[in-house]
Image: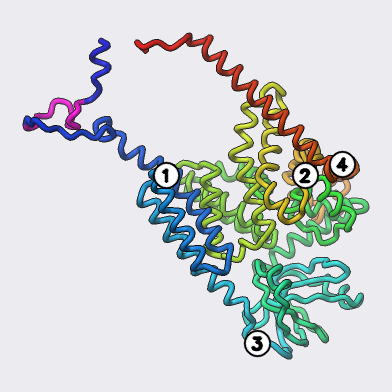
Amino acid sequence: MRRRYQRGPPVSGAPVGASAPWSWRVRVSIRRAYGVRRPIERQAVGAALPVGAAVAVAVATGRRSSPVVVVVVLVALVLLRGCVHAPRRALLAIAVLAILGAARSEAAWTALAPDRVGPYEGWVELVDDPQPFGRATRVIVEIEGERFEVSERRRAAQIRVRGWRAGERVVLHGDRRVLDDERAGRVAWQHVVGEFRVDWASDVATGSPVDRASNRVRELIERGAATLPGDDGALFRGLVVGDDRDQPRAMIDRFRASGLSHLTAVSGQNVSFVLAAAGPLLVRLRPWWRWAVTIGLIAWFVSLTRFEPSIVRAGVMAGLSATAFVLGRERSPFVLLCWAVTGLLLIDPLLCRSVGFWLSVGATGGVCTVGPWLASRLSAVGPVALPLGVTLGAQVGVVVPAMLVFGRLPLVSVPANLLAVPVAGFVMLYGLPAGLLAGTVPAVAPLVMLPCRVGVRWVDTVSIVAARLEPGGTATWIGWAVLAGAIVVAVVAASRRSAAMNGGRHGSPSADR
C-alpha cells in the first residue's frame, strides 16, 4: 500500500491507461505530471498582478519625471523576475500599465497650465460646495472647461457664496490669475489651474437633474439635522454624508487629535451601510437586476457625497465586488483594493496628490490584511479581538501618510475608535433614512432624530475626552512602543499555544506519514 501511494501519477505525463511509444529517454515535468501547472500559474498571476500593478502605477503617476520613473519600474520588474520567478505575462502587464500611467500623468500635469488668463464675465459652474478656508470661504468653479478657485474674505460676499451649491451655475465677473507653484501643487488633485478674483456676482441657476436631485437630498438632511442642538447637527451631517462645512474649528481639531477625523470623511463604511439598508430590496431581485440596482445605488451615493476621493475609492471597490459576485469570481478585498487603486490612478493620475485618497487606501489595506491576522492572534482578549485587530490594522495602514502629512499618530486613537466607531456606524446606518424623514416631515423630527442625537453626542464626547488624554510628543512614541511590544508578546504567545495544541492533538510526525 505504501509503495502504491508513493508512486504518484505516471511519470511520462500520459493519462492512466493510455499507450505511448517506449523510449529510453523520458522528460518529465512534475507540475504537468501532477496536473497542477495551470492552477499554480493562475495563483501566481492572481497574487503578483494586482499588487504589482497598483504599486507600479502609483509610482509612475506620483512624479512628474515620468520617463525616469518608468525606467526605474522596468528595472525593478526585471529584478523581481529574477528573485521570485514571477510569471512573464504578469510582469509584461505591469510594465504596460506603468508606461500607461506615466503617459497619463504627464498629460494631466501638462493640462494644469491655464489656457486663458485675464478678465472674464459670464456663467460659471460650481464644482463643489463652498468650504471654510481659514477666515475665508473657498469654492471651485469651472470656466470654459478649466477649474479656478475662488476665495472670498469679505463678510457679505461669504454670506452670498455659502448659499451656493455644487452643480449650480452663477454669473461672475472678475479676473483669472495663475497660481504660485506651492499653491498649485496643493490643489493639483482637484484639477485647479488658477485663481479667480471676483468683482461681482449676480444670477444663480440650477444645475443638471442629477445635481438638483443630490442638492434636494442634502437639503432634506440639513433640515433634519437642524433639529439637533448646538454643533451636533454639523457633526451628524459629517457622519452621514461627509458634509463638514459648518463644523467649528475646535471640533475639527479635537477629532484630529483623537484620531477620529476619518469618521467625518465618508468611506467604505458608509457605502456598506447604504447597501445594507437596501439589502431587503436587493435580495428580491434577479442577479443581473440586483447588480444594476447596486451599481446605480453606489453611483447615487458617490454623487450625493460630492465625489470625495475616499468615497470614490470605496464606490469603485463596491462596484468591483458586486461585479465579481454576479460573475461568480473570487472577491478578495485586498485584490479589489489593488485593482481600484490601479484603475482610479489611470483614470485620474492627479489622485496621487490627494492625502484623503491615500489615507483611505492605507486604512482599507490595513483592515483587509493586518486586521484579520492580528484578530486571530489576539483571541485572549475575547470579543474585543476583532475590533481591536481591525483598529490596529487601520492604524498600521495610515501610519506613513499620517506621519508625512500631519506629523503625528495619536496614541488615544486606538481606545477612541473602539468606543466611537460602533456608535458612529449606527448613526451612519440609521441617520440617512432618519434625516430624510425628519426633513420631509418636521413634526416627527424630534422623535425620529432622538437616537441620532444620543449617538452624535456620544461620539463627540469620546473625541473631547480622548483629545484631553492624548499625551503628545515623546510620550506618544513611548506609548506606541509599549503597545507594539505588548502586541508582539501576545502574538508570540498565541503562536506557541497554537503550536502546542496542534502537537498534542496530532502527535509527532513520523516518516510513514
Magenta highlight range = 10-21
297 horizontally vs 410: left or right: left
Q: Nearer the viewer, residue 218 or 324?
A: 324
Left or right relative to 99: residue 308? right
The number of numbered badges drawn on the structure is 4
Tell me the tag on residue 427.
2
Magenta stretch encompasses residue 19: yes
Identity, as a three-letter code, of the amino acid under mark 1: Cys
Q: Which mark is residue 290?
A: none
Q: Are marks 3 and 2 in contact (CB under 8 Å)?
A: no
Q: Badge 1: how crowded within 10 Å, few (<14), some, or many (20+)?
A: few
Q: Earlier in the sequence, mark 2 or mark 1?
A: 1
- Residue wearing tag 1: 83
Q: In the shown orientation, is residue 468 left or right of residue 430?
A: right
Residues tagged 4 and 2 counted as in contact (Cβ below 8 A): no
Q: Which residue is mark 3?
A: 116
Q: Earlier in the sequence, mark 4 or mark 2?
A: 2
Mark 2 and mark 1: span between their CA atoms?
Answer: 49 Å
Residue 295 in picture, x, y percent from top left: 55, 54
